[in-house]
Image (cartoon, rainbow, N blue to C red):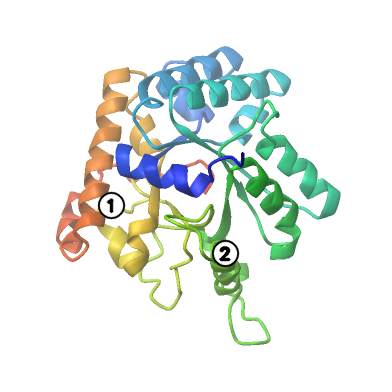
Amino acid sequence: MSPEPFGTRLRRAMDGRGPLCVGIDPHASLLAEWGLDDGVSGLERFSRTVVEALADRVAVLKPQSAFFERFGSRGVAVLERTVQDARAAGALVLMDAKRGDIGSTMAAYAESFLHRDAPLFSDALTVSPYLGYGSLRPAVTLARESGAGLFVLALTSNPEGAEVQRALRADGRDVAATMLAHLAEENRGEEPLGSFGAVVGATLGDLSSYDLSIGGPLLAPGIGAQGAAPADLPGVLGAAVGQVLPSVSRGVLRHGPDIGALRRAAERYTEEIRAAVAAPDQAPDQAADRAPEQAPEQAGE
């Protein structure tokens, strides 16, 4: 029997738990804020706390692999336990690793995160298409076989991204629009939600010149510390706002290590996002309710 597709599982999780993805980004400054050492023991305490607080209630947890990899094999071991514990508690895990390469190397990356027997098997993986969308084919194929998903970098919120993503092709279409078109084709005919999503920054403003109706989820980082608010989502994503999976990292994590405070922060964001998505015509009036923190996110897209 084929595994249930990621898009189906994600739609169910978003409908049941709310459309929120919380990053697990244990960078050094955040460990210090929690009173933890910048070492493997601090990394493990941080990750265990986030999983204990949120894995049984948010739709998606998104570990940023770089913050674990910097500790070498011991950090990767913590990442393995984090992924396994989060999935066991009911959260979908999106591995934020942004892998991208060609041929057998891309296939090996895919096997690391998308093969069901891999220690780091995750429900979905972020990938970079900037060696050409076709270079992602090994990951697409294995994701389909495993019931996993991909989130492809399309319109990222970092300012540098525009020099590649907004570059015009010979046919007059820019690179980001080309990636969105590829994803729409991957998701064609999939219901209720395709398994192949795009990363679209919530801080980018009006994106009405792009067709974001790709049939799959739109991972929208930038809520909270990067300056965007849930009320901004309809203005950015337009008619595709019903497929949005907003991602918040520091906006939630700064409330730790208190488990209750982490849960309350996630619940607030979930309710604000639900309100914005359910009533997009009213969402602009909520712009004054932005989260107060405006410090740089420090974590990846």
The quarter holding residue 131 reads bottom right
Q: Residue at x 24, y 28 (%)?
A: 264
Q: Which mark is residue 183?
A: 2
Q: Residue at x 56, y 36 (%)?
A: 64
Q: Residue at x 77, y 53 (%)?
A: 101
Q: Nearer the viewer, residue 116 or 170?
A: 116
Q: Nearer the viewer, residue 189 or 128?
A: 189
Residue 224 visible somewhere in the drawing: yes
Residue 18 visible somewhere in the drawing: no
Rendering coords of residue 236 (x, y %): 35, 65
The secondary structure type at the circle numbered 2 is: helix
Residue type marked 2:
Leu
- Residue 282, above or below 14: below
Distance, label 1 to label 2, CA atoms, is: 25 Å
Q: Which mark is residue 65?
A: none
Q: Which mark is residue 230?
A: 1
273 on left or right of 249 = left
Whether the residues at callouts 1 and 2 have beta carbons within 8 Å, the answer is: no
219 on left or right of 294 = right
Tally of numbered tags:
2
Q: Foreground mark, 1 or 2?
A: 2
Seen from this angle, which residue lies furthest bottom?
171
Rendering coords of residue 6 (x, y %): 52, 45
Q: Residue at x 37, y 19 (%)?
A: 257
- Residue 193, above or below 239: above
Rendering coords of residue 28 (x, y %): 53, 27
